[in-house]
Amino acid sequence: MDEEKTKGQQLAEELLMKPKGLGEIDNSILGESTDFCEGYKKFLCNKTEREIVDYTVPILESRGYTEYVRGKRYSPGDKFYMNNRGKGLLIVTMGSRPVSEGMRIGVSHIDSPRLDFKPNPLFESTSMAYFKTHYYGGVKKYQWFAIPLSLHGVVCKNNGETVKICIGEEEGEPQFCVTDLLPHLAKNQMKQPVAEAFNPENLNILIGSWPYNDEKVSDKVKLNMMSILSEKYGISEKDFLSAELCAVPAARPIDLGLDRSMVGAYGQDDSVCAYANLMAELDAKDPEYTTLTVFADKEETGSDGNTGMRSFFFRDFMEDLADTYGLKVRHILQRSMCLSCDVNAAIDPAFMEVYEPANCSYLGRGPVVSKYTGSGGKYSTNDASAETMSFLRSILDGAGIPWQVGELGKIEAGGGGTIASEISLHNLDTVDMGVPVLSMHAPFEVVSKADVLMLYKAIKAFYECPKQKP
Ligand code: MN
Ligand code: MN
């Protein structure tokens, strides 16, 4: 028999929060999340927004989604998607209630920090050939030196043909790297601040060292590389002018830790949320409210451009959908709610000085709901209302899903934003929810498998919840 609890113990249980890890709540979560994350690791093998869209569309079609037809009157249970230029997706399941009553929207982004090629990338120096890069998104430049890289992207040739390129992902394929300075000669470099010690113009990818065998030509290594590329892809140097190519870490997603409780991989910001969001969309059972799952591009560079969340593609799609039912988009969105599904920084004991332990997220404590992000005095953020927080809380608690709240870090330690601020501009109640990540934006990021599973369950509960928004 348990000892009888004192009044104070009872009160503490009733009135105080006691955060718990998912493993303490239910030990069986690890097994379930391990199964769930096998699919996640496959998803992570797609390392650019284009590859994620290419991977996702056949999955959607195998699950009964068809390409959106403007003007078509969809019925409850109908499933469709729209592909935004091969870099973004809008995925819908029609609910049993009319669209006029609002929608449940989940948005994540499928671009990740990386090294984009410059428009004129190929050069030879000291008898080696390189691609010049221009980094994309927030990278700590030093992390990209001396690690194996793979090359991804498309080249649009003059004849209208688009060639897809992916080198260094399959077993046995060659890989690439940016070279670093040896410590023996780094005396001066080591004295510089990190931000200055690594010159972005030095982020050049070593691609070859063997010359073309012809005495009569110069830049023999460069020519040899172009000749290899021409043979394999039918491209010439000019074709780089109409290409989107990049280098990303070549490492495959792996189980991390003796207990295999974590996933280590590139691109988990924000593929972790994109995968959870996609699976929730696929698995949501007979949703009453129409669900809309959005994969956006360009979040890492500020959501600009026509595939980013600031583009009208979202609004245009909503207008087409609304027109079909004789509705106004603004009236639908006013009654809708949106989860901006993006990652947050997990507390890291190595860098405690930037975290505020009572208000940051912890690996393995479930999805993290961020009321706001931004920086300083709550600049550049969507600060979710108490009513919105309460509604989400009632959904998560109602579905028995453990979750946590988290700010990014200490108030003036830095800052960062998510798509939430773009989405909320549409007069749409929005809140951030995602997974805590260690080493965010590094070539190798870490998440807890249990958090991934719980985020999926949380979004699914949000999609399935029949309760009306306050
Ligand atoms: Mn993100
Ligand atoms: Mn990011």
Image (cartoon, grey):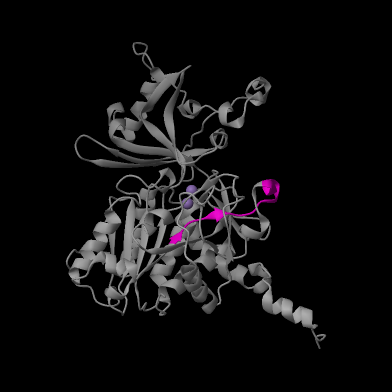
The residue under the point 39% across, 59% down is 424
Residue found 57% across the figure and 27% down from its top: 196
Query: Is 467 situated above or below 134?
Result: below
**Foreground residue, 399 or 452?**
399
Q: Which residues are magenta?
A: 340-353
Residue drawn at the location 21% of the way across and 70% of the way down: 327
Residue 245, position as x, y percentages in the image: 37, 38
Location of residue 416 in the rendering, given as x and y in whole percent from the top left corner: 51, 48
- Horizontal side, residue 116 vs residue 449: left or right: left
Where residue 324 sits in the image (x, y, percent)? 18, 69
Which residue lies most toward the bottom here? Answer: 1
Figure quadrant of the C terminus: bottom left
Kindly indicate the quadrant of the structure image that contains residue 237. top left
Residue sitting nearer the eye, 204 or 293? 293
In depth, the one of 44 and 198 nearer the eye is: 198
On the question of residue 380 being in view, the answer is yes
Quarter holding residue 43: bottom left
Residue 332 sits inside the magenta stretch: no
**In-image side of 322 versus 226 (left or right):** left
Q: Is residue 281 above or below residue 378?
A: below
Task: Measuring from the top left, give residue 106's x and y in whole percent.
Answer: 40, 64
Left or right relative to 23: residue 311: left
Which residue occupies the foreground of this view, 197 or 42? 197
Q: Residue at x 66, y 24 (%)?
A: 191
Q: Is residue 211 visible?
A: no
- Relative height, residue 245 to residue 314 (above, below): above
Q: Quadrant of the N terminus?
A: bottom right
Is residue 342 within the magenta segment?
A: yes
Q: Residue furthest front?
A: 377
